[in-house]
Image (cartoon, coloured by chain):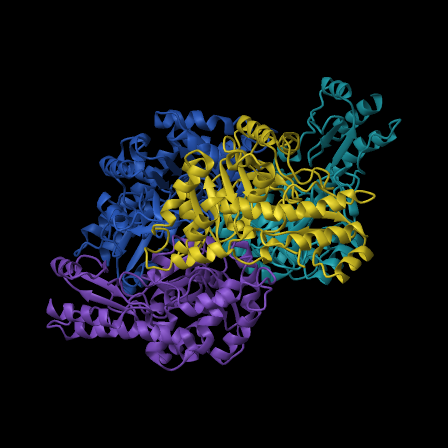
Chain colours: A blue, B cyan, C yellow, D purple
Amino acid sequence: MQFLSDNAAPVHPKLWEAMRAADATDAPYDGDALSQQLDDKMSALFGRECTAMWVATGTAANCLALATMCPPHGGVVCHREAHIEMDEGGAPGFYLHGAKLLLGGASDGSDHAKLTPDAIARVIDPIRDDVHQVQPAAISITQASEYGCSYRRDEIAAIGALAKERGLKLHMDGARFGNAAAFLGEGAASAAGVDHVDALSFGFIKNGGMSAEAIVFFDPELADVARYRRKRAGHLQSKGRYLAAQVLAMLEGDLWLENAAAANEAARAIGDAAKAAEDDRLLHPVEANEVFLRCSASERETLREKGFGFYDWGEDAARFVSAWNTDQQAARQLADAIADL
Amino acid sequence: MQFLSDNAAPVHPKLWEAMRAADATDAPYDGDALSQQLDDKMSALFGRECTAMWVATGTAANCLALATMCPPHGGVVCHREAHIEMDEGGAPGFYLHGAKLLLGGASDGSDHAKLTPDAIARVIDPIRDDVHQVQPAAISITQASEYGCSYRRDEIAAIGALAKERGLKLHMDGARFGNAAAFLGEGAASAAGVDHVDALSFGFIKNGGMSAEAIVFFDPELADVARYRRKRAGHLQSKGRYLAAQVLAMLEGDLWLENAAAANEAARAIGDAAKAAEDDRLLHPVEANEVFLRCSASERETLREKGFGFYDWGEDAARFVSAWNTDQQAARQLADAIADL
Amino acid sequence: MQFLSDNAAPVHPKLWEAMRAADATDAPYDGDALSQQLDDKMSALFGRECTAMWVATGTAANCLALATMCPPHGGVVCHREAHIEMDEGGAPGFYLHGAKLLLGGASDGSDHAKLTPDAIARVIDPIRDDVHQVQPAAISITQASEYGCSYRRDEIAAIGALAKERGLKLHMDGARFGNAAAFLGEGAASAAGVDHVDALSFGFIKNGGMSAEAIVFFDPELADVARYRRKRAGHLQSKGRYLAAQVLAMLEGDLWLENAAAANEAARAIGDAAKAAEDDRLLHPVEANEVFLRCSASERETLREKGFGFYDWGEDAARFVSAWNTDQQAARQLADAIADL
Amino acid sequence: MQFLSDNAAPVHPKLWEAMRAADATDAPYDGDALSQQLDDKMSALFGRECTAMWVATGTAANCLALATMCPPHGGVVCHREAHIEMDEGGAPGFYLHGAKLLLGGASDGSDHAKLTPDAIARVIDPIRDDVHQVQPAAISITQASEYGCSYRRDEIAAIGALAKERGLKLHMDGARFGNAAAFLGEGAASAAGVDHVDALSFGFIKNGGMSAEAIVFFDPELADVARYRRKRAGHLQSKGRYLAAQVLAMLEGDLWLENAAAANEAARAIGDAAKAAEDDRLLHPVEANEVFLRCSASERETLREKGFGFYDWGEDAARFVSAWNTDQQAARQLADAIADL
């Protein structure tokens, strides 16, 4: 019973079907009929005109989006726990040509890896407005956050207002956007803060996809630059129709929401058990498909002996991640095992 | 009857099978069992220890390979018609951090887009050995070339000798490596010039793949750097096992050679007809799966009216590309149509 | 009697005076009183509002200017003999983050290293308007050219019209701008084509300076970016007042024109002798301070035996460069020696 | 009475003399007789073979040195208060092509902006040895530190041992190296930790120079790369002899030490007064030419009314910097004024 990573899950059957259906010969790159539908489908989903393009990884999505927002001599404000800072092998430095990540937020997890206008202001206010210091050009937030927590509509709006006031662009890393949207339950546009966010990295791979994420530009001007940058980064696949097929299959009938809701349900069961434990073992509210649990080395040993797979999270904690295909019964078994600790 | 691009062809059924078989949960990135087999399988194929990694595009393969060979302040000698110069949207400038492509070879097609030691020497000999000029660090050749011609074993050896003498690394862009190897008929190691070449971009996508090429390092030290650079470029896919599955399926039973041979056969039929035409319409020998044909606008119109799809190649020529799935009968029909012009 | 390079000449006494006068303590970087005068003095010289900043080298001036005009994924059209292509050690690739130089013009010197609208069109017209090819963003011309020839007012206007039509920015490398302006005799604004050119690298070092060139932005919006880039490139000197002092001293009383005219006069004397030779030895018209002379190895030997220093220019030619301090009598002696060959 | 910045001080008369003496025509770039002496003079000073080159700014010196030590995908450990992090406008990101600064040390000033092996280990130990995280390649320390404190011989040795153990290169930013060496009093080699440090940015500009710092490579292999990078960064001045002249004049008769000692003496007088104050106003020991003083807004007002110029340092502190030409009597007056607060 594996709770290591949603990256390890298989591809959803409907995506296999869609990819096979894309097998007929069509124009290469993104000239095919499927890729050409992305703008319209995303515009319909988000209730406003937007421009969308597929890429193969979340790292590429994040960095291509940010590269349209920040010049090489600028900076991007993000949480110090953000994926772009911690887990992308320096990709922002590469794609943004040496631009700087300006780190904010709590280092002790107390903000659940979510930025606030205050936290952002604490980063940018001390920056002298001169050429000796890197000037901020954009903000990047993560929906859901690195600790599986979701920004509420008004939280995004508040950050958006600050961004606008300071002349900064706003990017949303949505590697687990589906999980956040499923948790929030107010629709894609609300979860994405489309009135405030300039571009969203819309993740599908952790949510049942194989190799396709989408960058959705709510500011279409940015998309033109991204097209050239995607090719330049070697991310314009010649058989792009197989990526488009994945994205379209995910949108069809809101499969992305359905998959995410299933993963969230499993996480919630586990989280509820953790929260009900004598000392509330939960480190962060469960607002997506991740559960961060206080538990000792021996307790982790106990869980592993019962057959549960997961990552240690520092000395005294563990991380459990559910996926679209997580067996709900396995999740309840894990919940029981946590209750029994 | 489509002869526009081998990029437009569907994915081979055996690759679909292999990808579906990879669906079981496994470790993310390249920690899965399939990715772990690449080194061994490639070593067996090339008859020497090598290190291999998958990437999603030929552009990424070429540029990641070259980035291990050339510092940001260096240069890479390539043919002026090379893909890295003409068709990769400036990706070498991005991946190599501003390193320069040093262009050589004929501009009139007379060398069939193949470099020679002489052509390379004409590029690098005039470069003053001082800091005011960009110093060459590597050579990149394309097997088969942009005009569908294959380097012979001794041609590679001669370039390799020059490279060694001048202290330059040697890269081979093998987007159509299978077609070259199938034409040459002396095995993978010979076609790749493994005693001279430091890294090969081994293409599968044009040859029946979906989204996987391999970079094969015959100099394993280079591979370590490439691993970090692949992640940094957003090319380390989290479900890498589906890319590994494609590569392994291609190697299994030499499917890559079989597919390439089929494409070559179709091209040869077309090429033979072109060669037999009154004035020998062939612009370049057919040594892979591409046919470059002298033909007028009205002749192209005639061919299109008969249902053949292809690209114009300048004013007075056309390019026909066959693929692994090209119907041999369609190829013969095209050959007849060319003969009838 | 040295005609090797105007880079080797000493610093003009008035610049020494000006630098010494700047010795009083003042604000660091470009906050000092002298640096603050640059915009006004340059605006007065060019008859329009412009923004100016000092840098220590022509390479930095060119590349900082171009970096404001061309994104990392774009291209700059320049002559294949241009300094930015041939002699700056790949600096454009560094400063422009991998952007590409798109080379045009004659390779046999027949255009005297000057671009024309036709030559530029031949570079950019074949570029397909898609993401696979690097799109042009700017044009760079050199006044005076690498072969010492000057663009006339209408030649610049014609290039400017093309640039405007194609949406390209226009940069002028003026390492020997003073010499061109002195030759043309129509004032700084005309020689700089201020109605067409977005930024000028205004060279002083070859013209009697020590370590200061100026970037003059006729499009002031570009200057803001350049300020950050200058610091980021380590070119914002902390005692910038000594650079400002040099530039101001050069402008004072048009010393820059006076120095350039002196150098030009020496070159003209040499060039006239070369032109009057039986077979007209001049390879390019003398329109600045450089003379390119057809002469054999034995003739060069003869000249060197008479004490003249100069560079060989390929097999059958020599280059003579005069400077602000070239002794006019020495120039006439050289002219006589050439006549005697 | 100005204590704002040592950058604002004039050029030392001996440097003016040396520059004027360099006025005779000589070879351009660094081919002149003066530039050619740098290696020998620096080798003599540091008692070991080293390679030295001039550059115009400390930012360029630091970044060119680091660019030889750290690949684009690597990281450089430095103090979070280091100049390369705080005050160079993102230059390391530019010169190192997106490499990352890995920040350590205290954020409250308690370590006086000096790194320790422990502080470095706390930065690099948590970095997972995989491609998802940026791997450290080098360490940069500052002598004297941003708070005017000097590394002792054994402190450098301890950091050097850690660097060696972890396979990291070691760089020393010596913008105020002279002040540290003068304070430590054990000679240049000891202050530079020549047995541990791979390259030193040897600052002269704050110490009476005009526009020349030196990069001194104790690992000469690194120097070759730096030469190409210097040109590529537009830092190879064509009249380099004027920079070489400054450096040589500084070394002549240990003028660099003499100037630094004078500045230190003034700072010490001020610091002693601050230390003797009722509550010990000193925030950091005075081990170079900077004094950081706890003092309230009204106290600062008092000092300014008495004619002293200085920078506020946050809410409750002030920074005083002395220079080679600081009048010792003015320093004593300031000391008295501080005592009177």
The location of residue A72, given as percent across then percent down, is 43, 46
Front-most of B268 and B124? B124
Say which quadrant the C terminus of chain D sits in: bottom left
Q: Position of residue C294 (x, y in %)?
A: 78, 48
* Quadrant housing the N terminus of chain D: bottom left
Q: Is residue D257 left or right of residue B106?
A: left
Q: Residue placed farthest to the bottom in the image?
A: D186
Q: How many marks?
A: 0
Which residue: 72% across, 28% down?
A: B314
Question: Which one is in front, D337 or B258?
Answer: D337
D89 over A222 or under it: above or below: below
Name the outermost residue toward the right: B278
Apparent side of residue D314 relative to residue D135 in the rendered image (left or right): left
Residue B16 visible in this rendered orientation of the protein = no
Whether residue D45 is visible here, answered yes or no, is yes
Residue D210 coordinates in the image, percent (x, y)? 42, 62
Is C297 situated above or below C97? below
Please tell me which residue lies in front, D326 or D4: D326
Tell me where residue C177 appears, x and y as whole percent.
56, 43
Question: In terms of image quadrants, where is residue D318?
Answer: bottom left
Q: Quadrant of residue A219?
A: top left
Q: Please determine whether, in this image, residue C57 is positioned above or below residue B325.
A: below
